[in-house]
């Protein structure tokens, strides 16, 4: 009798664990949507509508299983997420970074248009050439590129931190950067230089 009771108890525990098993995943589609919005906001539409990045270019991380000890909180997170269906990109830190990037855009555009600066394959800016620039211009372009890249890396870290507030999701700054790189390239203006996978520069 006791043996039967023990078996039944173990079966119930196993069924409860199976019911609360959740997937931990990297929300690539939500990051892609956030990236497209942020890049468009920073650069503006310019002379073209923002092109959506290619969803097939960045594979989503595969889900892994987790057996939480408490049903209540885990179920709530799985249903609602941290900020509903979207990632919160309106934190004070993220807004401050976006504002700094927007203020820098006008100066950067002249160097992007002139070809001195290009968009690297990692989505960061690179100084391609200093040709045609005087001493002040050379100093200015390097300062702008360094500041922009620092802000982009800070942005990716902040977004990854927001994602990781949800125990059902996981993200690293590198994963966020990979998807943002697609959006920076997709929304680049015609004539800007973009670095190919082989390290060569091509005009868009």
Image (tube, grey):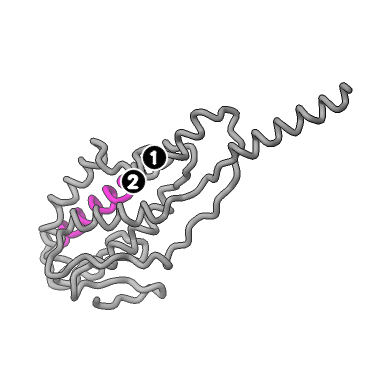
Q: Percent position (x, y) of residue 57?
A: 42, 67
Q: Nearer the viewer, residue 126 or 49?
A: 49
Q: Secondary structure at mark 1?
A: helix
Residue 119 versus residue 35 in the image, above or below: below
Residue 71 among magenta residues: no
Tell me if label 1 and label 2 are in contact, CB under 8 Å: no
Q: Percent position (x, y) of residue 165?
A: 42, 36
Residue 110 versus residue 42 in the image, above or below: below
Residue under numbered circle 1: 161
Q: Percent position (x, y) of residue 7?
A: 82, 30
Q: Secondary structure at mark 2?
A: loop
Sort mark 1 into few (<14), some (14-19) or many (20+) by Cα contacts within 10 Å.
Answer: some
What residue is at 39 percent from the left and 56 percent from the top? 29
Q: Is residue 59 left or right of residue 11?
A: left
Mark earlier in primary sequence (1, 2)? 2
Residue under numbered circle 2: 86
Residue 148 among magenta residues: yes
């Amino acid at each position: 009798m006791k043996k039967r009771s023990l078996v039944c108890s173990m079966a119930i525990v196993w069924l409860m664990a199976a019911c609360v098993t959740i997937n931990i995943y990297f929300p690539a589609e939500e990051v892609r949507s956030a990236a497209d919005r942020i890049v468009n906001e920073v650069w503006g539409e310019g002379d073209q509508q923002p092109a959506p990045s290619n969803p097939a270019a960045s594979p989503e991380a595969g889900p892994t299983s987790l057996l939480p000890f408490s049903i209540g909180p885990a179920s709530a997170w799985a249903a609602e997420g941290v900020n509903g269906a979207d990632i919160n990109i309106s934190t004070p830190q993220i807004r401050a970074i976006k504002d700094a990037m927007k203020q820098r855009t006008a100066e950067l555009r002249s160097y992007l248009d002139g070809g001195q600066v290009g968009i690297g394959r990692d989505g960061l800016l690179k100084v391609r050439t200093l040709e045609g620039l005087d001493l002040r211009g050379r100093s200015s372009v390097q300062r702008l590129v360094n500041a922009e890249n620092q802000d982009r890396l800070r942005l990716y870290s902040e977004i990854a931190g927001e994602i990781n507030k949800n125990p059902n999701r996981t993200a690293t700054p590198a994963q966020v950067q990979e998807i943002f790189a697609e959006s920076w390239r997709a929304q680049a203006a015609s004539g800007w230089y973009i670095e190919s996978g082989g390290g060569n520069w091509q005009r868009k």
